[in-house]
């Protein structure tokens, strides 16, 4: 039977109006009760919920098209390969990459950063070279560089934070970035505070001394339209599960010349051209970096997530989140005893409200909110350097996405009133 692949979701017809009720209806997980109360899911910076269209694509793939990619000549393998490579094109278009070959599938942002650390870092760094990172980074954009520095003799330097959790860039062009700097790595948006970083200035300063720039986009492309080519960085990493896609899939976009000259990350099937007894040659980019059977259904599911978000329009998503953030900062900020972390100006922050409440431990805040059906994250958010900077061990974090509502913010505030009552 010849049929066109059924694994790519139809993009929504152009529907610029932001219909929140309809969007919420697309997410089955939001329809449940938790501890007898309607779920309020505010842990989107950790992972997002998935729309029905993504779930359908995953189910359809396993029901009808399941086969390995690039290897078979039979129909199922053809369908799987087409859907898998179509998904790569969707992700490329989504972040403004003109060439899908510059999209390498990874397990997520962490895997993408480790790929660069190994495949680029081991061959380009040595004693005395410097890697510039920031105190704002998620552990996955710190630890791989520490390991790399340990193996190469390179030195780590950090951009510090100010009292609002913004990068202090005063010394950027006068010492912090210098002739020894080989790599600058920075998050687009902080998961712990929501700070949006001034990427153009950082990229310009790095390129002025010939350093390359990696942007950790785990919290970036999720909330805002990204155009990697006009941004001008050398690598951009993202995770599918934070943007309505499945877990275990993400992407690394890289500049073509860099990807071409980098060594493979892992060896195995799929990534070779010819294998001989003593040596092998590599497949073309991006396959050179994709050893073994890939996460086929993950990639296809991420393609469907891109279709879903594109159908709504990221401008509309951003506008909704901005509105919600303003409301949440105002409402949560007016709860007595609350301390909100992160930039004061809303222009410098994304849809995250990280806070403490009096003497209540953030774990207790989260536990009490959970009994009310409200899911927030409590802890160091894999950003222990940020916690140290503010001299706290943890914060509670409410993080919003396209399907959250002002009523849910009100439920959060009611939950915080309950926390205050218990701790009074
Ligand atoms: C800013 C940032 N970077 C990196 C990561 C790691 O992403 P993943 O666990 O999907 O690899 C996260 C996850 O929370 C993040 O928020």
Image: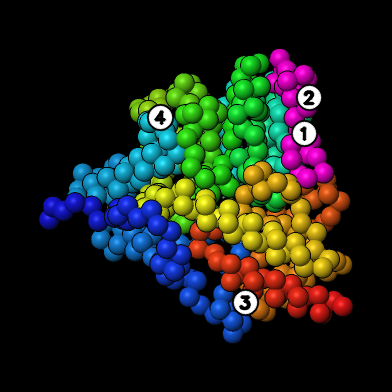
Q: Quadrant of residue 134?
A: top right
| Residue 83 placement (x, y as % from top left) | 30, 48
Instruction: Specify whether residue 260 is painted magenta.
Output: no
Q: Residue 34 carries which label?
A: none
Q: What element carries label 3?
A: loop
Which badge, 2 or 4, comes first in the chain's sequence?
2
Q: Quadrant of residue 56?
A: bottom left
Give the alpha-carbon distance from disc 1 to disc 4, as whole Å: 37 Å
Figure check: 368 above or below 71: below
Give the alpha-carbon distance from disc 2 to disc 4, as whole Å: 37 Å
Instruction: Specify whether residue 180 is painted magenta.
Output: yes
Give the alpha-carbon distance from disc 3 to disc 1, as whole Å: 38 Å
Q: Of helix, strand and loop, which mostly describes the magenta segment?
A: loop
Q: In which quarter of the image is the C terminus?
A: bottom right
Q: Which mark is residue 168?
A: 1
Which badge, 2 or 3, comes first in the chain's sequence?
2
Closer to the observer: label 4 or label 3? 3
Which badge, 1 or 4, comes first in the chain's sequence?
1
Closer to the observer: label 3 or label 1? 1
Residue at the bottom extreme, as displayed:
36
Closer to the observer: label 2 or label 4? 2
Q: Mark 4 points at which residue?
A: 285
Give the alpha-carbon distance from disc 2 to disc 1, as whole Å: 8 Å
Residue range in magenta is 159-181
119 relative position to 275: left or right: right
Closer to the observer: label 1 or label 4? 1
| Residue 120 placement (x, y as % from top left) | 57, 27
Asked whether residue 297 is in view, the answer is: no
Residue displayed at 75% across by 30% down: 169
Asked whether residue 200 is in view, the answer is: yes
Q: Name the residue under label 3.
A: 373
């Amino acid at each position: 039977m010849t049929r066109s692949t059924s694994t790519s979701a139809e993009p929504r017809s152009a529907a610029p109006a932001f219909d929140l009720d309809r969007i919420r209806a697309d997410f089955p997980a939001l329809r449940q009760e938790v501890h007898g109360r309607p779920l309020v899911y505010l842990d989107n910076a950790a992972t997002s919920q998935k729309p029905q269209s993504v779930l359908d694509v995953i189910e359809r793939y396993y029901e009808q098209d399941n086969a390995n990619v690039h290897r078979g000549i039979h129909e199922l393998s053809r369908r799987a390969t087409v859907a898998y490579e179509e998904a790569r094109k969707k992700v490329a278009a989504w972040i403004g990459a003109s060439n899908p070959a510059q999209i390498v599938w990874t397990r997520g942002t962490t895997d993408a950063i480790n790929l660069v650390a190994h495949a680029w870092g081991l061959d380009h760094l040595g004693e005395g070279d410097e890697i510039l990172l920031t105190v704002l980074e998620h552990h996955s954009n710190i630890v791989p560089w520490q390991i790399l520095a340990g193996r190469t003799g390179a030195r780590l330097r950090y951009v510090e934070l100010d009292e609002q959790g913004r990068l202090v860039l005063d010394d950027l062009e006068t010492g912090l970035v210098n002739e020894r700097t080989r790599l600058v790595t920075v998050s687009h948006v902080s998961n712990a505070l929501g700070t949006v970083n001034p990427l153009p200035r950082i990229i310009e300063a790095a390129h002025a001394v010939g350093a390359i720039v990696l942007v950790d986009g785990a919290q970036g492309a999720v909330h805002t339209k990204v155009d990697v080519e006009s941004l001008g960085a050398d690598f951009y990493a993202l995770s599918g599960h934070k943007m309505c896609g499945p877990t275990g899939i993400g992407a690394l976009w890289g500049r073509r010349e860099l990807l071409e000259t980098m060594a493979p990350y892992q060896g195995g099937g799929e990534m070779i051209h010819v294998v001989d007894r003593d040596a092998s040659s590599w497949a073309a980019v991006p396959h050179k970096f994709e050893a073994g059977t890939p996460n086929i259904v993950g990639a296809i599911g991420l393609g469907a997530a891109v279709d879903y978000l594109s159908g709504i329009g990221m401008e509309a998503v951003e506008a909704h989140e901005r509105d919600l953030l303003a409301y949440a900062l105002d409402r949560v900020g007016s709860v007595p005893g609350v301390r909100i972390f992160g930039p004061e100006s809303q222009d410098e922050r994304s849809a995250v409200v990280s806070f403490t409440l009096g003497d209540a431990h953030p774990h207790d805040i989260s536990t009490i909110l959970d009994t009310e059906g409200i899911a927030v994250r409590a802890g160091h958010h894999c950003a222990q350097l940020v916690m140290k900077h503010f001299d706290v061990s943890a914060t509670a974090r409410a993080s919003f996405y396209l399907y959250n509502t002002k009523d849910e913010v009100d439920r959060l505030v009611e939950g915080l009133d309950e926390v205050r009552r218990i701790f009074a």
